[in-house]
Image: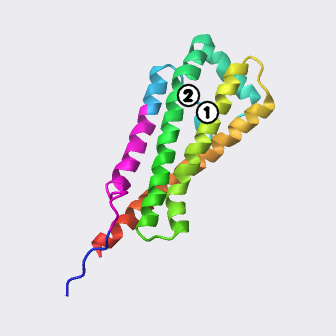
Amino acid sequence: MIDTVAFYPETVPLAVFVWGPVLVMILFWAAGIWSSRQGVPRMLENDWDGYNAADVEKLFAIYGETHRARYRNRVLPADVAFAFTYAIVGAILIAGLSMRGQPWWVAALCGGGWLLGGLCDVVENLAVARLLDKYPQVDAGDVAFASRATQIKLVLFLLGTVGAIAAAYLAFKPLAA
């Protein structure tokens, strides 16, 4: 007797497990290009070791008024849109895996990195916007919050990338059996 392929709900098609992460990576690349074209290297948002008030003051002084305005009004909104996109992709991965019979904790491990990382990225961007709005007075507490949010976001984005690969494997695994 021929075994049939398990029923997969059409709510979250299999293509999402490939094209969702591809979209995230393309937007990750595009956000970097957009930032470079604005003349604003994203030093704070990529600092794994964290940063302090002196680092922020030095960087914002180097940017100058024009580049700080571009950072605040062009780069940060684009980064927020990217953050919401990968948070949504993470949520869809969680829903798709749970609909395909994976336990919630497995689905959460696969898509939760991007879901929580995207939300943390939004918080980080709001914190950086606050730093830009208050400049030249830089509060150490605001900087510490933004720095910690950056570090958490970077770790969660990396975990989300690994989770997306695992989600694709788990989604397509029954088809190979």
Q: Which corner quadrant of the image does residue 69 belong to? A: top right
Q: Residue at x 46, y 59 (%)?
A: 95
Quadrant where the N terminus sits is: bottom left
Amino acid type shown at disc 1: Asn
Q: Nearer the viewer, residue 7 or 110?
A: 7
Residue carrying label 2? 76
Q: Residue at x 56, y 67 (%)?
A: 105
Estimate how packed mark 2 is, as few (under 14), some (14 to 19) or many (20 or more) residues with alpha carbons within 10 Å: many
CA–CA distance in space, label 2 to label 1: 6 Å
Q: Which corner quadrant of the image does residue 65 belong to? A: top right
| Residue extending furthest toward the top | 65
Amino acid type shown at disc 2: Leu
Q: Main secondary structure of the magenta part?
A: helix
| Residue extending furthest toward the left | 1
Q: Where residue 116 sits: x, y (%)?
A: 58, 50
Residue carrying label 1? 125
* Disc 1, SS: helix
Q: Nearer the viewer, residue 36 or 1?
A: 1
Q: Residue at x 76, y 23 (%)?
A: 138
Location of residue 20 with respect to 54 vertically, above or below: below
Quadrant where the C terminus sits is: bottom left
The reply to whether residue 10 is in sight is yes
* Magenta part of the chain: 8-30
Q: Label for residue 152? A: none
Q: Is residue 172 left or right of residue 167?
A: left
